[in-house]
Image (tube, helix red, strand yellow):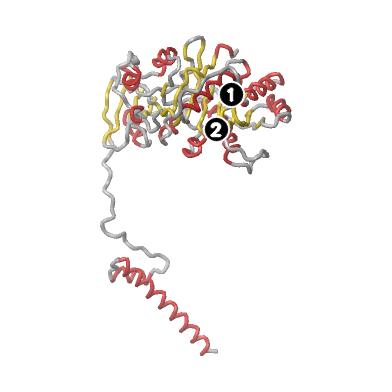
């Protein structure tokens, strides 16, 4: 018995010796020299083996980030978030810690973080403002002049007719609804069906977050092959909640709901495992305000005609937004984020008084046909390229205090999907939504 145990011990000793030799050979092949003391450490501490990195691999330290302070000045536009701070230094630090932040403007205790900084401006309340620009960084200021998605025309303009001309694209139509009765639910279904008829195929999703809509939409959806109602009663913050002295409860609520609605829309086109419909590959997702659709503010036939024209005429379109007007003036400035004002002067000979979104309204309202490049928009309806959404992995940010459409669009821009345009012909009339 003793002889057998001795043989087993010798066998395992040989195996361990072979393993040690192989390890030493590999270390020698890698050219790593281990000192005698380090070898002893390796022998004595079997549970931990640490080897120093090869020489010459240490990266050069990045230069420290600093802020150039500008008192009484403002970087207008380019906002992508707002945070509460108690000092100029804290605002500077907040910007330095956020990738993509190149500048900031401090208004009392609200720090507005900027993704681009054009020439600083002196507004009427300049004494209350302090701004700063990040220095010592390789962060690039976003510029519409250097857009990664130039607007390229791939076909001559498609003739526009009053008759339904089916375009060779598939669409998922999706929107939010609240407090709908049966008549309104039927009107929404009818309008979605009419708009869907302009596409070679479509799916329509209504996303509801209230009991009233939950009682009517499923019954309507059961009668329609391409129509689906999603009812999720979520616990969300009050629309009147004030966070960090910024009234962002409503924005966060809408961001949460739109994020869920968009998720359901993309599931229809990227997977057939989570739904009962046959596999469906969509080209675009159309997010819309369904109250505008049911009231006539969004005309499905006009929308179909314009999209048939645009989608077949241009490439590199990541987002096309409606021209949301009230009367004759562009209305949805909350979701609007213009390019830097010098861009419009250089390419369109239009002089913005400042970089505020309201100062782009005269240009949008006076443009009859040409697409208008912006950083963010909605106008009650936006057409998203499915490939851009899937590859960027962008969605609505339910933690931000800015308009939910801005956070989605800014994500797309930062990922290189910056082909975002307002189409003056894609009309949506807020005055009809009572």
Q: In this rendering, would 90 be left or right of 398? A: left
Do we see residue 292 in this rendering?
no
Residue occupying the point 49% across, 10% down: 328
Residue occupying the point 59% across, 28% down: 199
In the depicted view, which residue is nearer to us: 160 or 8?
A: 160
Q: In this view, does 347 lie above or below 12?
A: above
Q: Earlier in the sequence, mark 1 or mark 2?
A: 1
In the depicted view, which residue is nearer to us: 237 or 414?
A: 414
Q: In which quarter of the image is residue 230?
A: top right
**Front tag of 1 and 2:** 1
Measuring from the top left, give residue 289's x and y in whole percent: 57, 22
Measuring from the top left, give residue 279's x and y in whole percent: 63, 40
Question: Tag 1, which secondary structure?
Answer: loop
Q: Is residue 345 above or below residue 172?
A: above
* Disc 1 target residue: 165
* Disc 2 target residue: 259
Do we see residue 283 in this rendering?
yes
| Circle 2 Cα neighbour tier, 10 Å, few/some/many (<14 / 14–19 / ≥20) | some
Q: Determine the CA span between mark 1 and mark 2.
A: 32 Å
Q: In this rendering, would 87 be left or right of 398? A: left
Check whether the beta carbons of the residues at disc 1 and disc 2 lie within 8 A of each other: no
In the depicted view, which residue is nearer to us: 282 or 273?
A: 282
| Circle 1 Cα neighbour tier, 10 Å, few/some/many (<14 / 14–19 / ≥20) | some
């Amino acid at each position: 018995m003793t002889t057998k145990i001795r043989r087993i011990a010798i066998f395992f000793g040989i195996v361990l010796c072979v393993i040690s030799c192989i390890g030493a050979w590999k270390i020698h092949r890698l050219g790593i020299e281990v000192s005698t003391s380090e070898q002893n450490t390796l022998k004595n501490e079997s549970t931990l083996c640490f080897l120093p990195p090869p020489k010459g691999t240490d990266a050069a330290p990045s230069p420290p980030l600093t802020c150039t302070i500008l008192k009484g000045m403002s970087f207008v536009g380019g906002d992508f978030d707002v945070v509460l701070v108690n000092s100029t230094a804290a605002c500077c630090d907040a910007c330095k810690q956020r990738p993509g932040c190149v500048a900031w403007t401090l208004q009392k205790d609200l720090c507005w973080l900027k993704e681009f900084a054009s020439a600083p401006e002196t507004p009427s309340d300049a004494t209350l403002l302090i701004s700063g620009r990040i220095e010592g960084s390789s962060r690039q200021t976003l510029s519409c002049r250097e857009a990664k998605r130039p607007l390229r025309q791939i076909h001559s303009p498609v003739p526009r007719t009053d008759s339904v001309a089916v375009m060779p694209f598939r669409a998922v139509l999706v929107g939010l609804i609240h407090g709908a009765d049966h008549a309104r639910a039927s009107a929404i279904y009818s309008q979605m069906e009419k708009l869907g008829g302009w596409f070679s195929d479509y799916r329509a999703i209504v996303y509801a977050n209230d009991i009233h809509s939950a009682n009517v939409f499923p019954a309507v959806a059961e009668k329609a092959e391409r129509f689906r109602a999603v009812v999720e009663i979520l616990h969300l913050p009050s629309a009147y909640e004030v966070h960090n002295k910024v009234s962002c409860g409503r924005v966060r609520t809408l961001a949460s709901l739109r994020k869920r609605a968009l998720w359901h829309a993309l599931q229809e086109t990227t997977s057939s495992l989570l739904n009962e419909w046959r596999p469906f590959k969509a080209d675009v997702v159309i997010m819309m305000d369904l109250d505008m659709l049911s009231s006539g503010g969004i005309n499905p036939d006009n929308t179909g005609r314009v999209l048939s024209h645009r989608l077949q005429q241009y490439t590199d379109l990541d987002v096309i937004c409606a021209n949301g007007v009230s009367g004759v003036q562009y209305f949805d400035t909350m979701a609007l984020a213009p390019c830097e004002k010098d861009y419009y002067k250089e390419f369109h000979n239009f002089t913005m008084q400042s970089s505020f979104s309201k100062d782009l309204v005269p240009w949008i309202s006076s443009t009859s046909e040409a697409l208008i490049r912006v950083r963010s928009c909605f106008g009650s309806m936006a057409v998203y390229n499915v490939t851009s959404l899937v590859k960027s992995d962008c969605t609505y940010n339910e933690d931000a205090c800015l308009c939910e459409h801005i956070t989605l669009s800014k994500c797309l821009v930062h990922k290189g999907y910056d082909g975002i345009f307002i189409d003056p012909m894609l009309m949506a009339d807020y005055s009809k939504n009572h």
